[in-house]
Image (cartoon, grey):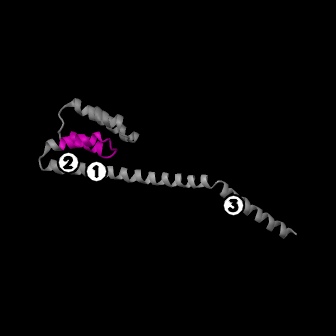
Amino acid sequence: MDEEITIINEKTRNEKIKEFFIQNKKILILSILCLILIVLGFYSFQIYADGQRKIISDKYNVAIIEYEKVKKDKTISSMREIVLDKDSTYSPLALYFLIDNDLVKNKKEVNELFDVLINKTSLETEIKNLIIYKKSSL
């Protein structure tokens, strides 16, 4: 008797599950498609961000190589562009390169580049404080 009841309960449960999937087929398909699109969008954005970061790093490396070949004007403009790209790694490096090699003589322009780093670039608090300290020491 108990076995028959458990078999009937199991069949009833299976029927309820089938009915649920049949009644909510569209919602389930849309949910799965949305989930797939979100995952694909996330990975696409990551690929795009990595590509942009690679472009900035290549631009930085080329600017340093050109500086060594005594093309200072192009190096200065490239480094300014890198600072204005607001990359958390290469923007501070580019500004420090400009300062350390005395490529930018105008204090106002240096302060504007520092302001871009401090206010518009997403940096960790400690790095931002170091940049503020470096700005105040100039």
Q: Is residue 83 magenta?
A: yes
- Secondary structure mostly seen in the magenta stretch: helix
Q: Secondary structure at mark 1?
A: helix
**Residue type for callout 2:** Ala
* Crowd band around label 1 with a 10 angstrom C-alpha radius: few (<14), some (14–19), many (20+): few
Query: Which of 70/11 is in front?
Result: 11
Q: Nearer the viewer, mark 2 or mark 1?
A: 1
Q: Which residue is mark 1?
A: 55
Residue stretch rendered in magenta on the structure = 75-100
Q: Which residue is mark 2?
A: 63
Q: Are marks 1 and 3 in contact (CB under 8 Å)?
A: no
Q: Earlier in the sequence, mark 2 or mark 3?
A: 3
Determine whether, in the image, residue 107 is placed left or right of residue 30: left
Query: Which of 67/58 is in front?
Result: 58
Q: Secondary structure at mark 3?
A: helix
Q: Secondary structure at mark 2?
A: helix
Determine whether, in the image, residue 48 is placed left or right of residue 1: left
Q: Are marks 2 and 3 in contact (CB under 8 Å)?
A: no
Residue 11 on image: x %, y %: 76, 65
Residue 15 figure quarter: bottom right
Q: Which residue is mark 3?
A: 18
